Image (tube, rainbow, N blue to C red):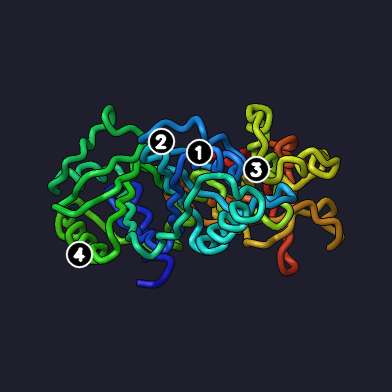
Amino acid sequence: NNREECIRAEKRAARGAVSLFDGSPLGKIEVRGPDAAVFLDRMYYNTMRTLAVGRIRYGIMLSEHGVIIDDGVCMRLADDHFVVSTTSGGASRIFGAFEEWLQCEWPNLRVLVTNVTSAWGNIAVAGPRARELLSTLTTDIGLDGSSFPHLSIRCGTLEGVRIRMARVGFTGELSFELNVPAGYTASLWECLLEHGASLGVMPIGIEALQELRTEKGYVHVGTDTDGRTLPADVGMGEMLAKKSDDFVGRRSLERADAKRADRLEFVGLEADDRATVLPIGAHVVADPRSRTGSQGYVTSSCMSEVLGRSVALGLVRAGRGRLGESVQIYSNGRLHSARIVSAHW
């Protein structure tokens, strides 16, 4: 099988049966102490101090310039105990930022942060048969939707091994992330493959995962953002009005540049030819006869079997105010006709 056929098969498993993804490289940072909630509220753009024990909240982190530098989920295990997930590439960087702010700016906060990325393995079990697969294993965690809803975390055992099980995912399907002590990751993986054989289980790689999240319009920090992207640019501007407390980057979001009407905004791009996969990096141009005057560019793109057409995401000037507008996409001397649409297909 060639690469594209393998990716399509992996995507079909995630959408139609059950898939396994090794998310162990994702950053995991323990944040503990009486002031843990106060600290995380300052480090996240989102409000975290109101997060209930046993619940999970998606969040983004900003630099002092208000630019998005990382995202992930924040999980509250107890009043004074959180686990923060980061992007794989951001694990050490975000841990370093936590330490710097605590030691240099807020030394009076009673908080201990520990980078436990390599101490825990992570396997994402996703797809319509994910719960069915986990039900074949021995666990003291209730897997039904009412006792274990989306964006919740439960601690217990799975096949006798200590586990933190989270109802989160990046595919848009029913998903459970299994966090176990790192030494058990490989054996758990083999166990899931064995128990899921009759359910059509299949391991998937990062290429399939990226296409699955592109189909759902999920933003990927570092792919669909650049060194200028602010929360409002990806549709999260309203959160600012709901948060009264201070946080890293807040002041910069009040600058005139942050409120420009022509900022690059996260949108979908729909090729007129359903079979045309728009090239990543291709530019949205105002005048097809000129190679200057880019109005943005394609950040993510793939062919979607489930939608029966190609899909693409991009950053386009004032994009969300231009939904439905026809544009030209330029790449390597070729032009493709497309429309600006919502990022959520």
Residue 307 appears left or right of 167 = right
> How many neighbours does mark 1 have within 10 angstroms: few (below 14), some (14-19), or many (20 or more)?
many
Question: Which structural element holds mark 4?
Answer: helix
Amino acid found under the numbered disc labelled 3: Val
Amino acid found under the numbered disc labelled 2: Asp
Q: Residue at (43%, 66%) from the top-left corner?
A: 4
Residue identifier under label 4:
187
Question: Residue farthest to the front?
Answer: 108
Residue 37 has which mark? 1
Amino acid found under the numbered disc labelled 1: Ala
Q: Earlier in the sequence, mark 1 or mark 4?
A: 1
Amino acid found under the numbered disc labelled 4: Ser
Q: Gap in Å between the C-alphas at discs 2 and 1?
A: 8 Å
Residue identifier under label 2:
79
Please indicate, yes or no, whether residue 224 appears anywhere in the rendered image: no
Q: Gap in Å between the C-alphas at discs 1 and 3?
A: 25 Å
Question: Which structural element holds mark 2?
Answer: loop
Instruction: Kindly indicate whether the residue at mark 1 contacts the one at mark 2 (C-beta within 8 angstroms).
Output: yes
Question: Residue farthest to the bottom?
Answer: 2
Q: Residue at (14%, 52%) from the top-left corner?
A: 160
Q: Gap in Å between the C-alphas at discs 2 and 4?
A: 32 Å
Instruction: Kindly indicate whether the residue at mark 4 contacts the one at mark 2 (C-beta within 8 angstroms).
Output: no
Residue 258 appears left or right of 93 = right
